[in-house]
Amino acid sequence: MNKKGVERKFAVVLVAAIICFSLSVNSVQAQDVATGTATATVLTALAVSAAQSLIFGNIYQGVAATIGNNIDASSGIFNILGQGSAGISISFALPQFIALADGSDRMTIGFSSTDATVDSNNTTPATVVAGDGWINVNPNLLPAATVIGAAGQTNVYLGGRIYPAVDQSAGGYSGDIILTVAYNGT
Amino acid sequence: MRRIRRLFIGVTLSFLLAAGSTAQTITVNNDLVFGDMFPGVPKTISKYTAGAAAEFNVRGTNGAEVSIQFTLPTKMTKIGVSIQMIFFNTDCAVDTRPNPIQASPLFDNLNPWSTLLYRIGVQGLTIYLGGTVVPRIVQPPGAYTADITLTVAYTGA
């Protein structure tokens, strides 16, 4: 092979090497992929139950009856279970009357501005004290700072008053008392 | 032989030039951390929140343009259940300064669903990402996770 032939062969090899090198460099630089993670921990879901109805028992026509919020056997009792110490928003939807099952007669029911107690220390209506939560508060405007008790439970106690008419029909009356609870994110 | 010598010099120069380009690398400086969440209460992590927003650092050749492409999840999961995730079109930010400032990034309110094009700075390029999760009221408690994949490539520009 003459000198020119050697040069040409060598040149071809070098060009091929350059191309290979360029390709390999490009493939190294082509891209990089990284995977981060999104994480979250969902806390305990709320559970609300009506542990005890607000029980007025037997009443007489024309004689109003009151049940306090501090009577273990007859105050309305609601249990709220959830994440300990979490802030919650709670509100009552209170009835204006209770009615016979067939709807043929109604009886007025009222709630005063001190008829509710919020107990974050899981005691009872009769034993709850100021340090346990919010005593004798307005059931139509429950405290904004309400929290689930550290043990994961808060109770709400409710009293009320009914006003039977003098010609009130005899029979069993009832009405729904709805407590709505939601985490407020605090 | 003179030609061969010239060719050698050319190859050497090419090699040096090529070696001067650095392959880009991505480091995950911080995951997107939502922390504790209450069922029924949506939670947003701002891209400005250090330690909670996702933060990626891209290293490579100073001045080179790169394309940035997220593969974003639409839900976080744990076994059998999921939480909806939302990434809004302003949830991303990029900072190419040597000392990036997360609270006021150089390029702000970017759409993480789009391919982004930026030039790598002297100290690389930092990407911030926020997001939102929407747990249901009856969301089962526990730890949820999702992958956020970031792909970065030189564009050649």
Image (spheres, coloured by chain):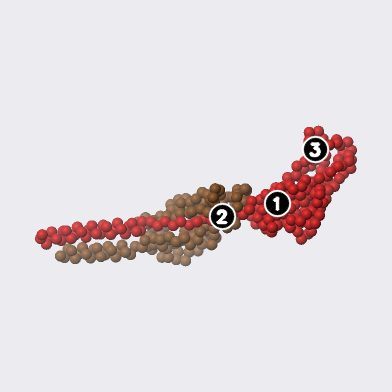
Image colour assigned to chain B: brown
* The C terminus of chain B lies in quadrant: bottom left
Q: Amino acid at mark 3?
A: Ala
Q: Amino acid at mark 1?
A: Ile
- Label number found at residue A61: none
Please, what secondary structure does the residue beneath circle 1 have?
A: strand
Q: Is residue B119 left or right of residue B82?
A: left
**Position above or below: A62 against B36:** above
- Residue for badge 1: A80
Q: Position of residue B146 (x, y in %)?
A: 51, 53
Q: How many marks?
A: 3
Q: Residue at x 40, y 55 (%)?
A: B67
Task: Please tell me whether mark 2 sits on a helix, a strand or a loop.
Answer: strand
Chain letter of mark 1 equals A
Residue B110: tell me if it is visible.
no
On residue B143, the disc is: 2
Q: Which mark is residue A99?
A: 3
Say if mark 2 contacts mark 1, CB within 8 Å. Answer: no
Q: Position of residue B156 (x, y in %)?
A: 35, 56
The Cα atoms of the two marked residues, 3 and 2, are separated by 47 Å
Same chain for mark 1 and mark 3? The answer is: yes
- Looking at the rendered image, the disc whose residue lies closer to the viewer, 1 or 3, is 1
Q: Chain of mark 2?
A: B
* Front residue (pair B85, A69): A69
Between the residue at mark 1 and the residue at mark 3, the CA separation in whole angstroms equals: 27 Å
- Give the red chain's letter: A
Residue A140 in percent (x, y) is at: 76, 49
| Residue at point 87%, 39% (across, down) | A165
Residue for point 78% across, 48% down: A76
Q: Residues within 10 Å of mark 3 (few under 14, many from 20)?
A: some
